[in-house]
Image (cartoon, grey):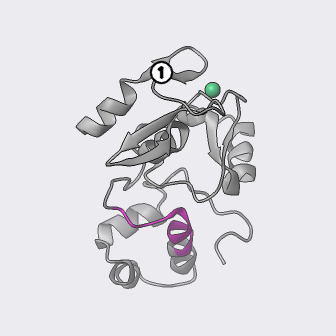
Amino acid sequence: MTDAQEAFWSRVHKTDTCWKWTGGTRGNGYGTYWVDGKRYYAHRYSYYLTYGVMPAGVILHHCDNPICIRPDHLSDGTQADNVLDMWAKGRGSAPPLHVGEAHHQTRLTAADILRIRTRYTAGASQQALADQYGLARSTVGKIVRGQSWRHVHAQTKAAA
Ligand SMILES: [Zn+2]
């Protein structure tokens, strides 16, 4: 864990249910967190630290508790159906702090992952995909085998 991550998680009060943000807040009840001169919503930053991608859309709180930043209480609104589906199947337990190739330098998005898997299924070689996305072939292998980015699941039309 980096210093920045430790600084973030040290402001979190974890309970058996919600993880409450104890840092600054905005008037609307959401926590806020400053990083490198930018202010983020704490729940969005928690999602970023956990999944390695800044959510493209709105973040939904399953617990309806704006101050909560517990990653498994949050979902990217654009994947809400998918996440709800996962929860319904009982696989919504707390994710590890880092999922997949989730690091600051990672430029891959969930959409890229779905595209890589779709193209692989359609016959593209792992090496071709690695070249296209600037990745190691072994990284592509992990993606297409579902060993990394496990939280990204294709929906019927999502990977077109
Ligand atoms: Zn919560």
Residue pushed farthest left? 3
Residue 139 placement, left or right of 78: left
The quadrant holding residue 50 is top left
* 32 to 35, vertically: above or below: above
- Ligand 1 lies in which image quarter? top right
Residue at 54% x, 38% y: name it.
Answer: 43
Magenta segment: 106-115
Q: Is residue 112 magenta?
A: yes
Q: Is residue 85 visible to us here?
A: yes
Residue 18 placement, left or right of 9: right
Residue at 33% x, 55% y: name it.
Answer: 104
Residue at 34% x, 81% y: name it.
Answer: 127
Q: Name the residue beneath numbered marker 1.
A: 22
Residue pushed farthest top? 16
Measured from the top left, where is residue 74 in percent x and y?
A: 62, 39
Task: Give the number of marks.
Answer: 1
Label 1 CB, ligand 1: below 8 Å?
no
- Where the N terminus falls, by quadrant? top left
Q: Is mark 1 on a helix, strand or loop?
A: loop
* 59 to 115, vertically: above or below: above
Identify which residue, 28 or 66, lies in the foreground: 28
Secondary structure mostly taken by the magenta-highlighted segment of the chain: helix
Measured from the top left, where is residue 107 in percent x and y?
A: 39, 67
Measured from the top left, where is residue 52 in percent x and y?
A: 43, 52
Identify which residue, 28 or 79, lies in the foreground: 28
* 97 to 53, vertically: above or below: above
Mark 1, residues whose alpha carbon is within 10 Å: few (<14), some, or many (≥20)?
some
